[in-house]
């Protein structure tokens, strides 16, 4: 069988899935530290960077210690220096606030108060306030120091729940008492949170780093001999040359040693060089332990510090990765948003005043634009619901309009009925003759009334079935009185036809009478009737 | 880099189908019917290209016989009815897949007529039978006692159809698809556009 494609559309799904899997695999290998990018060279660079960082941390720490010691000496409390060093160390491990922050804060406080105990109390308060408000330890301690000296405005700016009046009127003791009440235990709570625990681990890592740095510096100084660093500088230059020569020579020595069967292997697979290095490391360990034992006992587990260091390094790396990914994703989303005209138009339309159905339609279109299918389904459901609601509302509106029309018609009908009732009760108007005509013709039969041609009185049809109302007196008396110049007596209107015409006078008379009747019936003006209808 | 396939490449078809499946199944039915019409027109065109007689000089090809050619006789109606359409998926080299509309020739004689001479325009190279053996063992070599028959066969088909085919070319079905490619592309674009409009109209209600 032959199969010939007519049309096709490529589907990237397989490719996308494969890319995802590859990315996942790459992440996993990275997390295990076996990524191909991480070469020995990179590891050595990282180690060098860490060593530099450790040395810098040790230097900064030593400098901060010296500054605090000098401050204490200046305020006459130099005896408290060892105790305070230990206190700050313990405090940083308990709260997770680095000693780099604690020392300057304490320094500020002790400079202001001149009292170690009071400064310790205020430092504890500083940590509580800092943990609660999110202000830096330095900011809070500076404010407290100022307040101790009488400038309470800085405390007000911290936004810690003290009014201006309170700050002005209350004494420092009262203010601190209130603050203690307000912020008591905040630092402890903060330290017990995950963030706090991480900060404590961070402190441990920092301590480990400093310790390594101190050892590096000590080692370098000890290399300098009696004159310390001065000798070291000179020695370093010589050492550089010497080391390069030694390395070159050592390579030859090692290759030679390897050739000697007895020295090449000690016991199983252990080389004599490896055994020598192990022995040197052992000596180093003993030396460090001896010196530590002389100075102070190591209160903290070295293993913990190492683990914390590893953890902290991993956390930092992960955070950096996450930040990078977030940044890329945010940029991508922003760019898509910027150039997606449809999305912009939909968003703009949604901001306007639109009815519910239109809103749901727009939201459905918006959901359609996203990759997530769940929101499509929910949007569709909402859209259908909105349509049903809109239909129902439309139907009820129409019913209400119909009801209104019915009510209006009912009212109109009632009005008509009422009017008809009133009309029925009215007296039937009876008009008199409008112009009787006296026939002059001699052809009128004997006994025939001369008024037989009296006009037919226009009568309004009476709707009342009962007895006709009886009118007493003259109903038009008032009208007559109002128009005194008008002759209302119909008998006074007489049309005498004396024309010598060829027409039959009676016929002519009937014609004139019919014309007058038409004028009266239709309410036309009688003035024009003379010249014809 | 996406692979280059035969036929007309269209875009938006899969997405439109997915959306219609989700929101407007009636429009999907309409769209499928319209696509079927496009395919049907192509199919009918291809069927109309099938000659009513076998090529001159190959009259025996049109007669029912046994042996190696049994079931491969050229019957015009059989060849016509062997041309069918179907929509299917095909896995392309690598990670790509595609949803594809095919036109197929399921009749053996039709397939022969379509492709004869693509690979060996002068018939398969001849490898004489080794003495004592019933058939030769060499694949892709003719062991026929009539070595020129293949070339003759191809020549007669070429004469009738006026088409020489090479590589992936073909005489009836493939040629029809190639000739109608612009029409198919336009029609498919229209079909997809119409379906999209219908969906938009429904959503905008």
Image (tube, coloured by chain):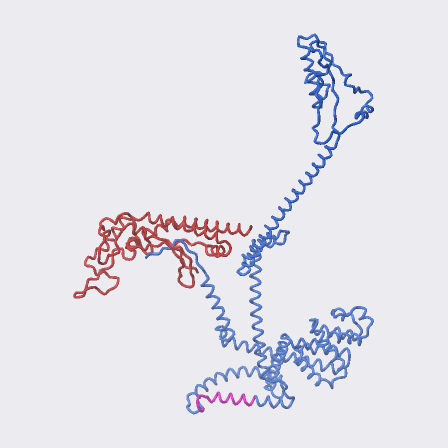
Chain colours: A blue, B red
Q: Report the side of A288 relative to B73 (left or right).
A: right
**Residue A235 belongs to the span the image colors magenta:** no
Q: In this rendering, does residue B38 appear at all?
A: yes
In the picture shown, does residue B44 fall above or below A37?
above
Residue A206 lies in what quarter of the image? bottom right
Look at the image and tell me in which quarter the N terminus of chain A lies: bottom left
Residue A347 lies in what quarter of the image? bottom right
In the picture shown, does residue A486 fall above or below B39?
above
Magenta stretch, residue numbers = A266-284
**Residue A268 belongs to the span the image colors magenta:** yes
Residue B70 percent location from the top left of the image = 24, 57
Residues A155 and A464: in front is A464
Residues A440 and B135: in front is A440
**Total numbered labels:** 0
Residues A438 and A513: in front is A438
Residues B80 and A204: in front is B80
Residue A464 lies in what quarter of the image? top right
In the picture shown, does residue A279 fall above or below A4?
below
Residue A284 percent location from the top left of the image = 56, 88
Q: Residue at x 76, y 74 (%)?
A: A179
Secondary structure mostly seen in magenta is helix
Residue A132 percent location from the top left of the image = 70, 72
Q: Report the side of B21 relative to A227 (left or right).
A: left
In the picture shown, does residue B3 fall above or below A463?
below
Q: Report the side of A66 relative to A339 (left or right).
A: right
Q: Report the side of A129 relative to B15 (left or right).
A: right
Q: In this rendering, does residue A231 appear at all?
A: no
């Amino acid at each position: 069988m032959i199969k010939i494609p007519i049309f096709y559309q490529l589907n990237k799904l397989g490719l996308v899935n494969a890319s995802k899997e590859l990315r996942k695999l790459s992440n996993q290998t990275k997390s295990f530290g076996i990524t191909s990018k991480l070469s020995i060279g990179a590891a050595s660079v990282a180690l060098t960077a860490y060593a530099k960082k450790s040395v810098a941390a040790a230097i900064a720490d030593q400098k901060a210690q010296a500054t605090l010691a000098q401050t204490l000496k200046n305020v006459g409390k130099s005896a408290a220096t060892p105790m305070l060093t230990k206190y700050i160390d313990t405090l940083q491990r308990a709260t997770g606030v680095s000693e780099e922050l604690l020392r300057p804060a304490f320094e500020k406080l002790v400079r202001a108060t001149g009292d170690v105990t009071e400064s310790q109390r205020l430092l504890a308060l500083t940590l509580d306030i800092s943990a609660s408000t999110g202000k830096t330890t330095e900011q809070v301690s500076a404010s407290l120091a100022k307040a101790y000296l009488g400038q309470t405005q800085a405390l007000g700016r911290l936004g810690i729940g003290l009014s201006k009046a309170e700050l002005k009127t209350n004494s420092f003791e009262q203010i601190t008492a209130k603050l203690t009440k307000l912020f008591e235990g905040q630092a402890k709570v903060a330290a017990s949170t995950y963030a706090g625990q991480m900060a404590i681990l961070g402190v441990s890592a920092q301590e480990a780093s400093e310790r390594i740095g101190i050892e590096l510096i000590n080692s370098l100084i000890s290399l300098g001999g009696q004159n310390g660093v001065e000798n070291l500088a000179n020695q370093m230059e010589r050492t550089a040359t010497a080391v390069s020569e030694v390395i070159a020579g050592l390579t030859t020595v090692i290759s030679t040693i390897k050739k000697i069967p007895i020295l090449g292997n000690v016991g199983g697979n252990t080389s004599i060089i490896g055994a020598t290095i192990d022995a040197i490391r052992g000596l180093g360990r003993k030396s460090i332990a001896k010196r530590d034992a002389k100075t102070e006992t190591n209160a903290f587990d070295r293993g913990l510090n190492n683990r914390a260091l590893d953890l902290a390094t991993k956390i930092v790396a992960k955070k950096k990765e996450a930040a990078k990914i977030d940044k890329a994703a945010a940029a991508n989303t922003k760019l898509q948003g910027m150039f997606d005209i449809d999305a912009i138009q939909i968003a703009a339309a949604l901001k306007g005043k639109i009815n519910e159905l239109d809103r749901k339609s727009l939201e459905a279109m918006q959901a359609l634009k996203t990759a997530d299918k769940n929101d499509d389904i929910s949007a569709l459901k909402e859209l259908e619901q909105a349509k049903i609601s809109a239909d129902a509302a439309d139907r009820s509106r129409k019913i209400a309009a119909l009801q209104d029309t019915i009510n209006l018609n009912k009212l109109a009908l009632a009005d008509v009925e009422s009017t008809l009732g009133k009309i029925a009760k009215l007296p039937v108007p009876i008009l008199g003759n409008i112009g009787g005509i006296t026939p002059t013709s001699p052809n009128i039969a004997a006994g025939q009334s001369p008024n037989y041609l009296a006009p037919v009185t226009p009568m309004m049809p009476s709707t009342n079935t009962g007895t006709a109302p009886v009118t007493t007196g003259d109903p038009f008396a008032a009208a007559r009185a109002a128009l005194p110049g008008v002759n209302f007596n119909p008998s006074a209107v007489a049309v005498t036809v004396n024309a010598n015409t060829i027409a039959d006078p009676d016929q002519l008379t009937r014609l004139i009478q019919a014309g007058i009747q038409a004028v009266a019936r239709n309410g036309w003006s009688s003035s024009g009737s003379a010249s014809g209808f | 880099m996406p692979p280059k396939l035969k036929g007309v490449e269209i875009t938006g078809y899969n997405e439109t189908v997915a959306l219609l499946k989700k929101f407007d199944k009636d429009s999907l039915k309409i769209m499928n019917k319209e696509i079927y019409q496009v395919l049907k027109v192509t199919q009918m065109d291809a069927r109309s290209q099938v000659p009513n007689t076998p090529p001159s000089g190959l009259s025996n090809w049109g007669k029912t016989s046994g042996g190696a050619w049994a079931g491969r006789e050229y019957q015009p109606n059989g060849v016509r009815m062997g041309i069918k359409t179907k929509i299917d998926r095909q896995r392309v080299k690598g990670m790509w897949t595609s949803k594809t509309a095919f036109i197929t020739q399921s009749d053996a004689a039709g397939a022969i007529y379509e492709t004869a001479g693509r690979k060996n325009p002068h018939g398969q190279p001849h490898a004489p039978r080794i003495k004592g053996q019933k058939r030769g063992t060499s694949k892709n070599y003719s062991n026929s006692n009539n070595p020129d028959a293949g070339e003759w066969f191809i020549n007669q088909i070429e004469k009738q159809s006026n088409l020489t085919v090479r590589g992936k070319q073909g005489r009836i079905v493939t040629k029809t698809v190639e000739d109608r490619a612009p029409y198919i592309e336009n029609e498919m674009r229209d079909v997809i556009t119409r379906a999209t409009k219908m969906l938009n109209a429904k959503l905008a209600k």
